[in-house]
Image (tube, rainbow, N blue to C red):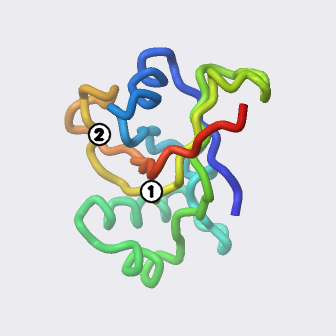
Amino acid sequence: MSDLRLPLKTKWFDMTKNGIKTEDYREITPYWIKRLVDNDIDLTIDEINMGLCALRDGHTQDHVYNVYGFWFKSFTYNIMTLGYPNADDKDRIIQFEHKGIEVAYGNPEWGAESDKYYFVIKHGKQIKNNQ
């Protein structure tokens, strides 16, 4: 498995680093579909969107896989960065266990627009940096 690297703006990075923000949001666009969806059978964006609609309607990921043929990619860690730092700039990099991806509404206090669905990337336990 690989790591999911997500750059953040200062406000969201600080909230995440301080344990306030426990998930991250990415818009449902072709770019993020390609990064987050395991699509071994070359589904079109429209076909994937039908499956994402099923998730929004409360169907399980198992159902979506069985009916639509895709799944979210597996990641080991969520690597959250303040902008695009150098690899040795540990103050601008935080790492969490990856706890999955959902399609759901986001929290407006954490940067989401009201009544809009997102890929919701869940953070688990923070992994301490080796400085």
> Disc 2 designates what residue?
106
Residue in front for this viewpoint, 1 or 27: 1
Picture coordinates of residue 68 (x, y %)? 47, 75
Q: Which of marks 1 and 2 is nearer the N terminus?
A: 1
> Can you say which quadrant of the picture contains the C terminus?
top right
Quadrant for residue 55, please give it. bottom left
Residue 101, label in figure: 1
- The Cα atoms of the two marked residues, 1 and 2, are separated by 12 Å
Outermost residue toward the front in this view = 131
Image quarter of residue 75: bottom right
**Residue at 38% over, 57% down:** 102
117 in relation to 100, above or below: above
User: Where does the N terminus fall, quadrant-wise?
Assistant: bottom right
Tell me: 107 left or right of 29: left
Q: Is mark 2 on a helix, strand or loop?
A: loop
Residue in the picture at 39% in, 47% down: 120
**Residue at 53 percent of width and 71 percent of height:** 70
Give residue 124's mark: none
Q: Residues within 10 Å of mark 1 (few under 14, many from 20)?
A: many
How far across and down, in percent of the image, does residue 43 sit?
A: 59, 67
Badge 2: residue crowd in 10 Å (few <14, some 14–19, many ≥20): many
**Amino acid type of the residue tagged 2 in the rendering:** Gly
Q: Which residue is drawn at 62% across and 47% down?
A: 4
